Image (cartoon, grey):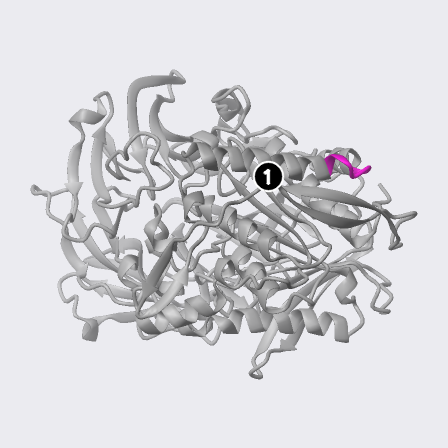
Amino acid sequence: MPRRLAIATALAACALTFTACGSTTLDYPETPRGDQVDDYHGTQVADPYRWLEDDNAPETTAWVTAENEVTFGYLDQIPFRAAMNARLRELNDYPKYSSPSRRGDYYFFTKNDGNQNQSVIYMQKGLDGTPEVLIDPNTFSADGTTRLSMFAVSKDAHYAVYGKAVGGGDWSEYYVMDITTKTTLPEVIKWVKVSDAAWAGDGFFYSRYPAPAPGMELTTRNENHQVYFHRVGTSQDADELAYEDPAHPQRFHTVGVTENERFAVLSIADRGTGKNGNAVFVRDLSKPGKTFAPLIPDIGDDEFGVVEDVENGFLVQTSHNAPNGRVVRIDTRRPDEANWVDVLPEKPEPLAGVSMAGGKLFATYLKDVATRAYVYGPDGADEHEIALPGLGTAGGFGGLRDSTSVFYTFTSFNYPPTIFQYDIATQASEVFRQAELPGFDATAYEVRQVFVTSKDGTKVPMFLTHKKGLTLDGSNPTLLYGYGGFNSVTAPSFSAFRVALLENGFVYASANMRGGGEYGETWHQAGTKLKKQNVFDDFIACAEWLKAEKYTSSERLVLQGGSNGGLLVAAVENQRPDLARVVVAQAGVMDMLRFQVFTIGWNWIPDYGSSDNPDEFKALYAYSPVHNAKEGTSYPATMITTADHDDRVVPAHSFKYAAALQHAQGGPAPILIRVETNSAHGASSTEKAIEITADIYAFIFHNLGLTPAR
């Protein structure tokens, strides 16, 4: 029989008023608890929901269907759910552009008219030319959920290769288009993953895995990453194997090609063994032979990326002996480290990115998470700082050797993405395209940055965005968002969807915990493996600061995170169930003892460690969400989300955590799991993004006892 749970629901009489007005009884599906027990270094660990790992099993399918019936039945009773969906659709309905990139005489860019499911690729001759549709991914599938996963144009702009990802998953199929006729050629390249396409003459390099067994895409561990070269006009069967290493099946092998198409650059990573860095090998395509020669022969914890080739060598961005990053010149005639020349030496601020265009180096650094952009000569001579509009994030700055200008995009929490064109000769920027949101007044909101003291005394940055004139009385609904992992920066950015929260009086708080890349590799390492608890402590400290400073209270606080951030909020929920009223955990890594056995999960070992290591097992077991849900605890209202095509963080993580939390819940709040179809690690279409965001926001407002004003 289903376990019955009385759920007290809060129906608001007016906006920002909490009133418990009724109750709903949820019938959770029966979730059998198996007797699976595993031995980890002498510790017996029960895994009662192991059966949910098989997403193809009829029992799992039936469980998902039953859970979705409960979830959508609950959401259907929220009176303003449809209105929230409509408001998000309205807010998102404005044109969105990417920065243009040039090949030959042509510029290529993407545009979404507003709520198109997929952005469309356009081309035009010159910046003053008439845009023409080149590829419309909205035609890929009837429901708009097959997305464009990759697009690369040949040097002469004759051909383009583009990828299709069904349901937005990580697997892609590549196709070749003749741009001159806008026709797609017959060849299809399958089972592509962790790959770009690097053009070289009459074809391109790409990376793929051997085909998994039918129906096993979400459970088979991806191994033996191979590099192939495909020539236009031939079938995939004729592709040339350029590199493989079956002796090391969990290594990544990816290839790029320098702008002049002289060198193919092979990057090799071995993250399955816990190493953060990569090796670099190069192949001179102008000479006979197909061997990649070592530039950086060994894989360690240092990262290397070729920026461009220069006379007798390469400019390389690296963290070697520079945790904040630097750019060095490596002479291939004398490649030993003793002969490396610093072009951009390490700074106190981390190097976020570097590119070369028009004979200049463009480098972006992070100053307390905000972007600073600089222009340097090819020898590293400091020439100019590009003035940015304010506290925010800038990216782009790409171009060719003969470029006279570059484009970059700037955004912040209250600043919609705006594309600027920077003239290299005059050192001046001007607006190229500016987003215009209907009815959005940026001046009504303020953004500020604060620094929170964590448990061990570390200062943690946090951005706050809210209406001007906010009253600090502890009553403001507040959403605290975080990620904290994989050297990723949670940078200031704009979201039209987020306006639906801000206009209803929410405070949006974005925490920059350790584990990310906000302060370079040292900051990253301080939140990994045996130090992962620092990330949770940082997040908890940010939540406590928001309450201590009277921004909000536990009754008005929401925690949200996705992927590694889903793990974050789930672990914090287990450790501090009293911290917040609502938790939204999206596509989280929830089983920390078995993540490495699915698809690409072994790739996360450098950050998390592995249960195969005795010391790392202890750390993982201490916070693993599915293993730390304590029976009888009163947990906050929780929405867990996942999708049926997620081949990165497979749905089993969320299935097992939802089952564990529903079993453990000793309080009145709902524990729901929402399983999306034809979607993946992120929403596969605009329609899917609107639907899931509307449901999350409706769940949040409902459980805070609020009714949105619009």
The residue that appears at 10% across and 43% down in the rendered structure is 290
Number of disc labels: 1
* 615 horizontally vs 663: left or right: left
Say if 162 sits above or below 637 in the image.
Answer: above
Could you say where residue 36 lies in the image, as x and y percent from the top left? 38, 53
Say if 305 sits above or below 175 in the image.
Answer: below
The residue that appears at 52% across and 66% down in the rendered structure is 366
Q: Residue furthest left?
A: 288
Judge whether residue 509 is colored magenta.
no
Q: The C terminus is located in which quarter?
A: top right
The residue that appears at 72% across and 38% down in the rendered structure is 75
Of residues 532 and 65, the one drawn nearer to the viewer in this rendering: 65
* 317 horizontally vs 560: left or right: left
Asked whether residue 382 appears in the rendered view, the answer is: no
Could you say where residue 614 lies in the image, as x and y percent from the top left? 32, 71
Q: What residue sits right under mark 1 in the picture?
A: 67
Q: Residue furthest bottom?
A: 457
Of residues 337 and 54, the one drawn nearer to the viewer in this rendering: 54
Say if 371 sits above or below 254 in the image.
Answer: below
Q: Residue furthest right?
A: 13
Residue 340 location, quadrant? bottom left
Label 1 Cα crowd, 10 Å radius (few <14 / some 14-19 / many 20+):
many
Of residues 562 and 194, the one drawn nearer to the viewer in this rendering: 562
Q: Residue furthest front?
A: 1
Residue 272 location, quadrant? bottom left
Of residues 87 and 392, the one drawn nearer to the viewer in this rendering: 87
Could you say where residue 520 lies in the image, as x and y percent from the top left? 45, 70
User: In terms of secondary structure, where does tag 1 sit?
Assistant: helix
Magenta span covers which residues? 75-80
Q: Check disc 1 and give the amino acid type.
A: Glu
Judge whether residue 79 is colored magenta.
yes
Asked whether residue 40 appears in the rendered view, the answer is: yes
